[in-house]
Amino acid sequence: MSEPLDLPSLWSHEPHSLLRFTPGDLVADIDPDATPGFRGVKSDAPTLQEERNVRFAELQEMLYARSRVDDTRSVLLVLQGMDTAGKGGIVKHVVGGCNPQGVDYFNFGKPTPEELSHHFLWRIRKALPRPGHIGVFDRSHYEDVLIVRVHNLVPPAVWEPRYDEINAFERELVESGTSLVKVAMFVSLDEQKKRLAERLERPDKYWKYNPGDIDERLKWPLYQEAYQAMLDRTSTEYAPWHVVPCNRKWYSRLAVTELMIEALKQLNMSWPPPDFDVEAEKKRLKKA
Amino acid sequence: MSEPLDLPSLWSHEPHSLLRFTPGDLVADIDPDATPGFRGVKSDAPTLQEERNVRFAELQEMLYARSRVDDTRSVLLVLQGMDTAGKGGIVKHVVGGCNPQGVDYFNFGKPTPEELSHHFLWRIRKALPRPGHIGVFDRSHYEDVLIVRVHNLVPPAVWEPRYDEINAFERELVESGTSLVKVAMFVSLDEQKKRLAERLERPDKYWKYNPGDIDERLKWPLYQEAYQAMLDRTSTEYAPWHVVPCNRKWYSRLAVTELMIEALKQLNMSWPPPDFDVEAEKKRLKKA
């Protein structure tokens, strides 16, 4: 098997370093239209996406294979973003390139009464990826410092300590072998309006529309503050945030694919050695 | 959205009728090399597979969308077959065409002590697909009348009644809205030898090899009997078996894709109607 190029030449810089959020960076400065580090054009995207999905899938298979020989590591993709930012598209077009066998996907909606009766991390802990799996959180524990903060669902004395609790939780995850790829997806208000309007035009999209999306939209300034605080306070050395401009879906998908490939490469994996005598098995098989 | 052709012209007959097992059919007559109903050639497969995966994914999305408006139906793909028959390839290349959001995949290995302390259907019931989901059983409750029978893991007085119990269980599933697509995959002993040998040649395949596979291989006559009994006794009107020749991977993948598309078409779905006033929302959005 020949080794594919690991930084396709259409990228001038590696997305994992270029998109990494450094505390102090301003959410107000993010340009959702931008395509940082990519020097190709939209028409390059389909072929490149396909190629890189193959690479992603190979690495995912290796991670899965290694879990059969006691490597318990896993990679968790955390997706946060306003409605229409394209979380679903990442799941479909990026994660969808992997073998479903090795994917643990969770969508975190409004908490149930049972979930609310527990600590906010209770339902999160139950959804962590199994060893060897790629976990996907479509929304996550970060809702507990985003929508919860914006809507005053709990008093500041409750949400305020959560940033530190999240950091402690994520440190624990990383120490126990789960790499985090945290992606904050940014779409502009104009583009969001277009995408919501499309959902109202197409009967095959009605199911994705929720009248509450408009209410959230009107609270963008408050969300912007909440995102700023979240990024400033939870982008750590061991679990940094990546900020992905999402007005161009093709860009955001390519970028997240590279982030996942990089996280898997960081695990320095190789195919697991056989736990049987290869030559003896070849002889047995010949006779069988 | 234009309606794709639902029986691509490369098929002379619909796989769901052609491959359907009728009690009395003989397992000994199955030709794993055959490509029943397909009048194209291998080189037609990649494009057709891609096209049909798109159709499959559209129908899967509709099923998922409908679960948001109280349609609780689901489709469960049950994969059974000897080692190397290609179950994993079906998961990767057929189910992998769907959105991971809507897939509930389970791999049934050797039962745990806890599972063994319960009725054999206990662990199966816990893994049933959620409403709106495509469930995938990679091995299933049928192991309890296959490997269990062949290895005398329980006495005949225990496994014998299981055929009826399975039928009753599956009738209950179907009545509660889960369509079953049961696929028995047949690979020849020669082809199996080749595939096992390949696993012993390639370090990236060692992890898929298990010395026990050879022991199972030597028991093929006993498995053949067990498969015959399983097919005869559990291929029902409401949950028929389909017998898929698997020496040609491209054929088996195309065939299973058609079986899934047909099962979804049988649900006669349409996109769910909006549960909001579309025109009013358009006005709200304009101002937002």
Image (spheres, coloured by chain):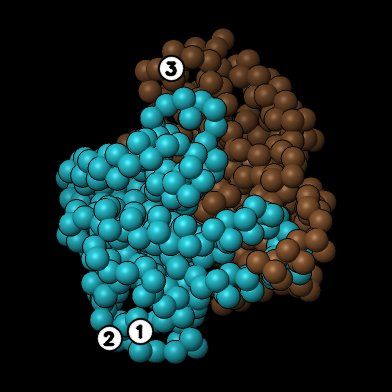
Chain colours: A cyan, B brown
From what the image shows, is residue B193 above or below residue B217? below
Decide: few, some or many residues near mark 2? Use Cα within 10 Å; few <14, some 14-19, many ≥20: some
Q: Is residue A138 above or below residue B39?
A: above
Q: Is residue A212 above or below residue B224?
A: below
Q: Residue B146: give x, y in percent of width and height.
A: 52, 29
**Do the residues indicated by labels 3 and 1 lie within the same chain of the protein?**
no
Callout 1, which amino acid?
Phe
Disc 2 marks which amino acid? Ser
At mark 3, the secondary structure is helix
Q: Do the residues labelled 2 and 1 touch (CB within 8 Å)?
A: yes
What chain does badge 3 belong to? B
Q: Using a 10 Å C-alpha cutoff, classify the residue at mark 3 as few (fewer than 14 neighbours), some (14 to 19) or many (20 or more).
A: few
Residue B107, given in percent of the width and then of the height, sits at 46, 39
Q: Can residue A237 be seen in this view?
A: yes
Both on one chain, marks 2 and 1?
A: yes
Residue ID for mark 3: B116
Q: Residues within 10 Å of mark 1 (few under 14, many from 20)?
A: some
